[in-house]
Image (cartoon, grey):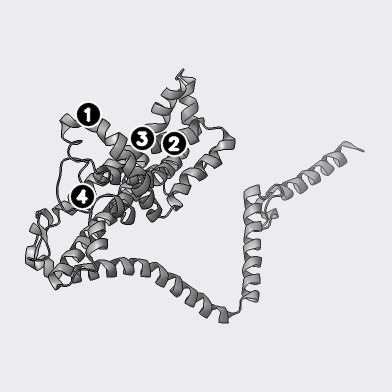
Amino acid sequence: MSLPRAVTHLSRMSGTVNEMNSPDHFEPNQKPATAIPTLAQTATRRTQRAAATALQRIRQSHPPSSRIPDAAFSVLILFTAISVFAIVVFVAWQLYDKSRLSLHQFGLAFFYGRDWDPVNGDFGAMPFIYGTLVSSFLALLIAVPLSVGVAVYITEMCPIRLRAIISFLVELLAAIPSVIYGLWGIFVLAPLLREYVEPFLAKTLGWTGFFSGPMYGIGMLAAGIILSIMVIPIIASITREVLTAVPQSQREAVLALGATRWEMIRMGVLRNARIGIVGGIILGLGRALGETMAVTMVIGNRPEVSRSLFAPGYTMASVIANEFTEATGDLYLSALVQIGLALFLVTLIVNALARLLVWSITGGTAGRARA
């Protein structure tokens, strides 16, 4: 090929290349061949297709006529939720309405009056409030160490094979009827206290004034012991769930610092679960405040304020159970209902406070058992 022809051929090829590389050669909406969709875009498209397909299936299988049953079901569920709150409000209103006569007659003096004389129409709730508080706090004084000890043993030290058995036995105490506890207290606990425990306490701690006077076997001490046995399952179960909610990494971190098992339990577990444990204790207190039958059978049922734990007493729940059928006058009946109103409000507040404390440590979910 001659030199002029070669130059002409190269010029034509250069023009062709320039035309191909010019911006006008590409179409406006044409994308480069390297524009491959990303994995996220592909997953989004697949999700959209799946959602559209599922929605189409739902529309085909659920005709428009199913909207009426769905609406009726929603209204029914809403009604059941509201009914619980309505029942509590209705009970509180009825108690207040039936106790208006006593509220008007005595006012706030009803709660610190010490006389309970239905014959002369003189009523004061101080002996019943005192008996309720003393028996309940005595029960907590006995039950809290036992309950926390049981919960710590089950969650931290008990072999896995025995955990379910011990937990079942502890929770079985809550299934025993209160009248059975009352019978056991009359025929077993009261003679034991009268013959052995109370003489020993009077001899060693009689100088305090809390263990002096006649020894009947029944009284505040017997009521406190019965209540402590009845609230142990509640405090132990709540404490166990709170302890299992503590992360396992917390225990491992304390042990990694060279702590012993007791130091790990004290600093790594109990310290982090103390709010929930207090909530369980308050929940047990609410249970003790409202107990009726077992306490009525062993407390002695005498409306007086005595320093000695050997002396008989009375509680708010016991006086309602014993004297409600004997209330002939309107003022007598209204005074008993006012005691019921006070007990209802105290129990409601105590349980609400306990639930709040337990929720604050568990985050609203039950503790999961550790493997």
Amino acid marked by disc 2 = Val
Asked if residue 274 is positioned above or below residue 90 in the image, the reply reads above
Q: Earlier in the sequence, mark 4 or mark 2?
A: 2
Cα distance, mark 3 to mark 4?
A: 25 Å
Q: Is residue 3 left or right of residue 309?
A: right
- Pointer 4: what residue? 313
**Which class describes the residues within 10 Å of circle 1: few (<14), some (14-19), or many (20+)?**
few
Cα distance, mark 3 to mark 2?
A: 9 Å
- Pointer 1: what residue? 203
**In front: label 2 or label 1:** 1
**In front: label 4 or label 2:** 4
Q: Earlier in the sequence, mark 1 or mark 4?
A: 1
The label number, if any, that marks residue 150 in the structure image: 2
Secondary-structure class at tag 1: helix
Of residues 241 and 286, the one nearer the viewer is: 286
Cα distance, mark 4 to mark 2?
A: 31 Å
Q: Earlier in the sequence, mark 1 or mark 3?
A: 3
